[in-house]
Image (cartoon, rainbow, N blue to C red):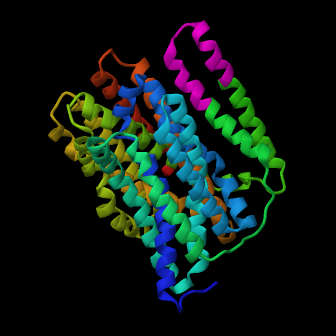
Amino acid sequence: MAIASDPNRSKWVLALTSLGFFMAMMDAMIVTTASTAIRTEFQISVRSLQWALNAYNITIAAVLLVGVILGERWGRRRIYILGLLVFTLGSVFCALATNINGLILARVVEGLGASVMTPMSMAILTHTLPASQRGRALGIWSGIGGLALIVGPSLGGLIVAQFTWQWIFWINVPIGLLAICLSGRYLPESHGQSEPVNLIDNGLMVGVSTGLIWALSATTSGSGLDQLKWPLLIGLISLAGGGWFIYRQAHEAAPMIPLTFFREKRFTGGNLATACLYGSMYGVVFFLPQYLQTRQGATALTAGLELLPWTGTLVVVAPFAGQAVDRFGEQRIATLGLLFQGIGYLFIAGFVQKPYAWIVLPLMLAGVGLSMAGPALQKAVIGSVPHLAIGKAAGIYNVFRLLGGALGTAIAVVSFYQLSGQSFASGFQVTMIVTAGLSLLGMVWSR
């Protein structure tokens, strides 16, 4: 459906699809500065708290490809609106949660909605707008999603400082309901190529990813054989399930994740480097606001503002990073970005006992690295597959990004408990060194 002749309708399509993307991205970040308040109210450990973040990311990663298939078959607008509804209901459940288990389950519901909001918003925008408007619109759409990474922690800190942490979820409700009503009125319906929905494969992806990350996280509860037998058993079962999933993908006519893509070095290396890049970033974003509040004495609002030298670089560097990728190539820019991020985190580890001013420049360096490596790796992955396979390649890229983030958070928590002393500062220092190593590890695959 071409709508170039109706500029007002074009603006509605861009605004509504960008809003859904922004909401999905925002909820991955806004909870970070509220983490200390949640941990204090529920009287829980850092190990339990991580699932308030990981449950959301794992759910999106595991269900994202199925959401794409459902949208292509049943209608992109219909599934997008359904995603908004589920996300809004999940936000209500999060706000009403009275313990960490209830919050985790509610975050899963939120993740189910967000898993279709991002791909469907992009698909609706791409399909609806004519080619002459598409590039600029996608640039705005991506920029608004990136804005969520910047303002999310600060907004979360502001809400917690002025109200309570529950309001970071209540704020989604009126926005979500308004988006549902306007989307039904202004977004056109469209369909794509219909593929069968394989519930077994999706179930395996959910079970394997959750099982592996839970097993890794549970190793922090003790070191004796009796205490580790369940994590080891669940880990082995999850690995076996992963093997079965790979076997099924190799023998199915329409696999969720075509293994033939991984024969291309750029595709495999780009996705693995992406997992390291965002695993490192999510491990830091989980702990850094807690460190600023626990060790530096910052309020939730101040902690959110103190993250701006890190997240704010996305606005400044991202446009230049795109030009640099075109000029110097994805591999060089991605490798340099991973290096900058890793070095930035190492400097922060060295300045743990120093005032906040000492970590401003390292935060900026790490932000520059993330801003460089992110678009470079995305371009490498998308550019390594045939044009008709771009949609599925983009979905796989996001799966690696989100599961890498969840795994990075789990590794950071394990490091915090197992490799450090008793104080939060020493645990944070070890965590920063480990997350830096994860970023530097990505350089192995980015070259």
Residue sitting at x 73%, y 39%: 204
* Residue 144 in view in this figure: yes
Residue sitting at x 50%, y 49%: 274
Magenta run includes residue 230: yes
The span picked out in magenta is 212-234
Residue sitting at x 21%, y 32%: 351
Question: For this view, does 386 lie left or right of residue 32?
Answer: right
* Residue 272 in view in this figure: no
Residue 167 on image: x %, y %:
38, 45
Nearer the observer, 58 or 242: 58
Question: For this view, does 11 lie left or right of residue 321?
Answer: right
Residue 26 on image: x %, y %:
43, 53
Q: Is the magenta stretch mostly helix, strand or loop?
A: helix
Residue 441 on image: x %, y %:
46, 39
Taking the view exactly as shown, the residue that stands out farthest to the bottom is 5
Residue sitting at x 48%, y 43%: 276
Nearer the observer, 46 or 313: 46
The quadrant of the picture occupied by the N terminus is bottom right
Magenta run includes residue 126: no
- Image label count: 0
Question: For this view, does 427 lie left or right of residue 120?
Answer: left
Residue 15 on image: x %, y %:
46, 72
